[in-house]
Amino acid sequence: MKFCVRRKPFHGYKECGDRCFIKEFNRKTLVAVIDGLGHGRSAEDAAVKAFEYLKKDYHLSLSEIFRGCNEFLKRTVGAAMGIALIDHENCCITFAGIGNISGRVVGERSFSLMSDFGIVGAGIRKVKVETRPFEHANMLIMHSDGISERFDVSSYSEEVRSDPRRLAEAISREVSRSNDDSIIVVGRVVE
Ligand SMILES: [Mn+2]
């Protein structure tokens, strides 16, 4: 898949607590968006820790990843995290999220990816994992709450929509909040 990530720290800060982890393996693509609580150094520390955890345990099931990451982040401020796993062989997408990470699949049949309440690192209940069909022509968008959900992909020109880089830039420019870290990831399958 081809991805574009746009990431901005809280206005005036160097550190950014929003991160993303992308891994392709066994004809699958895993995309995780992490938002360390708050902003600044402590948020970044939590996000980096989640990233480190994902680097070693990305191949586990999504519920196992959330359980493991929750343990791993215990001594941090905690984080919101959303993970999408696209299975290219079986044309489906599996999603689970804790905290304010939003996602959507845009295509002939568009739908939203919903996160549960909670904080990874502060003790999480059972994680809801949902699987839905995923067509090759679909586009995946995931973002932290530093990006308002009030954007409409269909309002952009075909030229912008078909290019993950231009679309991520346009959305980030138009609806990101300056009083929070923000991240948006746009991805699509390339032949
Ligand atoms: Mn945030």
Image (tube, grey):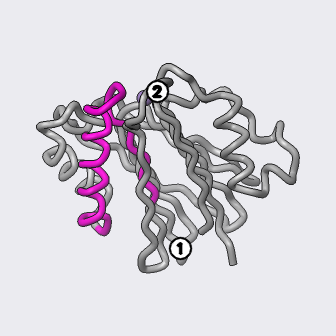
90 above or below 174? below
Residue 96 in the image: state x and y as whole percent. 39, 47
Would you say the residues marked 1 and 2 are in contact, meaning their CB atoms lie under 8 Å apart? no
Determine the secondary structure under disc 2.
Answer: loop
Instruction: Give the amino acid at mark 2.
Output: Phe
Of 178 and 20, nearer the camera is 178
Residue marked by disc 2 = 10
**On the rendered structure, is 7 left or right of 164?**
left
Question: Which residue is at 22% across, 49% downward?
Answer: 69
Based on the picture, tell me whether residue 161 belongs to the magenta stretch: no
Of 160 and 137, nearer the camera is 160
186 above or below 99? below
Q: How many marks?
A: 2
Magenta highlight: main SS: helix
Residue marked by disc 1 = 90
Picture quarter with the N terminus: bottom right
Of 171 and 190, nearer the camera is 171
Instruction: Give the amino acid at mark 1.
Output: Asn
Question: Which residue is at 41% across, 46% downward?
Answer: 19
Q: Is mark 2 within 8 Å of ligand 1?
A: no
Based on the picture, tell me whether residue 46 belongs to the magenta stretch: yes
Question: Which residue is at 68% across, 72% downward?
Answer: 190
Residue extent of the magenta highlight = 31-59
Q: Give the image quarter of residue 120.
A: top left
Residue 144 in the image: state x and y as whole percent. 48, 36
Q: Give the image quarter of residue 74.
A: top left
Question: Which residue is at 13% across, 46% downward?
Answer: 71
Residue 123 in the image: state x and y as whole percent. 17, 34
Label 1 vs label 2: CA separation?
39 Å
Determine the secondary structure under disc 1.
Answer: loop
Q: Earlier in the sequence, mark 1 or mark 2?
A: 2
Q: Residues within 10 Å of mark 2 (few under 14, many from 20)?
A: many
